[in-house]
Amino acid sequence: MIEVFLEGHDYSYEVLDILSSYFDRETIQFVHEKDPADSRSLFIHSSMAFDAGDVVFKCVVRHGDANVTEEKRFSRAGGGEQEMRKQYKRMLKNNLLTALEAFTGKKMPWGILTGIRPVKVVHKLLDQGFSEEDIQDRLTGFYRLSVDKAKLCLEIAAVERKYILPYDDRKVSVYISIPFCPTRCSYCSFPSHEVGKWGHLADEYLNCLYEEMDSVYNKLAGAGYSIQTVYIGGGTPTVLNHAQLKDLLEQVNRCFVSGETKEFTVEAGRPDTLDREKLSMLKAAGVTRISINPQSMNSATLERIGRRHTPEEVVRAYDLARSTGHSNINMDIIIGLPGEDIDMVVKTLDAALALKPEGLTVHTLAIKRASRLNEQGGDMGWVEEDEISGMVEAAAYYAGKMGMKPYYLYKQRYMVGNHENIGYSIPGYECLYNMQIMEEKQSIIGLGAGAVSKLVFLKEDRLERLENIKNVEYYISRFGHVMEKKLLGLAALIDG
């Protein structure tokens, strides 16, 4: 058990974030005793105090006779109360991480950047006029990133800025949720519904979705907004039957696609949902990018995680996509799936090399609370952290062999090892939607069950989340409430 005592601050969330990089989150508890009993296995005392014009953070880590004390003094934070708290939280994480590094001898490659979007820090510093050299020093110094991760952040930011600048609050992107799948993968925490059980609701769901699309279109068009990118995700959108998919594409084109639309993506993730007619339909509807995602090219793994397709079906789907004219295909793979070793990952990467996708998204497995893997627990054949590092390095090497460069990344909680999800692409084939949703300088309007709208108020440097109901049945039965909430949110964005 790890027991933690806080003094002079209430930043328990930030403390838990750093500690979770080193210890099992379930073993961490906060206590109200300043002086621990000798029997405690590990005790951490984190304090914050003000001294003249400085703020002093002190962290003590004690385990038996082992004792590490780290004290750091910073200048007091400036700005409003919210900004000051944000700065103090970063200082606290710096102090705590320094103590844990000294105590364990283990450095974390992402330092104190435990949040989802580490590249946002780089964009903010670039916007403030800092040079790349200054940012590199700040990332490796105060933020405590490894040199490799700092360089990766700068490299990705440089690519993204070619696409996302200048910021324009009259351009938005649209995400459309089709929350149905052939089966539910064991690692999945998304709001997806197995079509065998919930498919009878698909037509009624789509009718509600079209009404939501119409209302949003009228609101945005009336205020002079343009749609830069459209992304249909899920779930698995291509699990819809031919008539449903055709109708969906027609409705999306009618509402959101115009001469100002730069990108139209559809997730065609499960190869067992694809045939020539559907792929031709996507191409004829003006879809510019699709994603066909094996996750692994090992049959035993696919069966273990609940996917019903085979590696051979992945190859067939790629051949069909090429023969129907698709020239921008992304492939998703997952590093750290239970039972996989480095040789199995290399087999998947060799298959990707042969298929020649324009993009490769490499996910590190995250065991989310809502996933079946988390519920099962036990001995699932989890991959060791040092093996994960080798797999991540192998993926980067293969991406380079395919002529790809990294263009966006994000982190998730509960990831296996302290790694990241990273998107690679051949230059010129980057997914604009992925960059916009990661860097949060453009509003994303989410439509359908489980979709999240992110409303960006550029002048205030502020973001508001607006979440739709996840459950398909409730989305349908409470659709009036969904629309009322959505239109109020859009009105605030437009008036702001």
Image (spheres, helix red, strand yellow):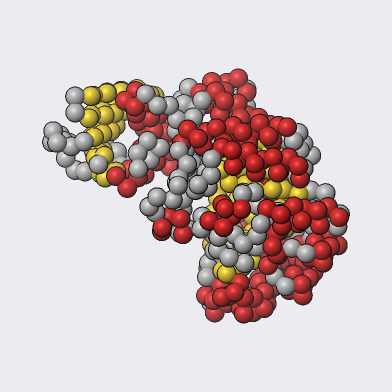
Give the left or right position of residue 430, taking residue 125 as reference: right
Q: Position of residue 149 (x, y in %)?
A: 56, 29
Q: Is residue 174 visible?
A: no
Q: Residue at x 38, y 52 (%)?
A: 378
Q: Where 352 sits versus 284, above or below? A: above
Q: Where 350 sits versus 367, above or below? A: above
Q: Residue at x 37, y 24 (%)?
A: 105
Number of marks present in the image shown: 0
Q: Is residue 464 visible?
A: yes
Q: Position of residue 210 (x, y in %)?
A: 69, 73
Q: Nearer the viewer, residue 422 or 460?
A: 422
Give the left or right position of residue 37, taking residue 406 as reference: left
Q: Position of residue 64 (x, y in %)?
A: 19, 28
Could you tell me which quadrant the N terminus lies in? top left
Could you tell me which quadrant the C terminus lies in? bottom right
Q: Residue at x 53, y 40 (%)?
A: 341
Q: Residue at x 83, y 59 (%)?
A: 283
Q: Position of residue 406 (x, y in %)?
A: 67, 35
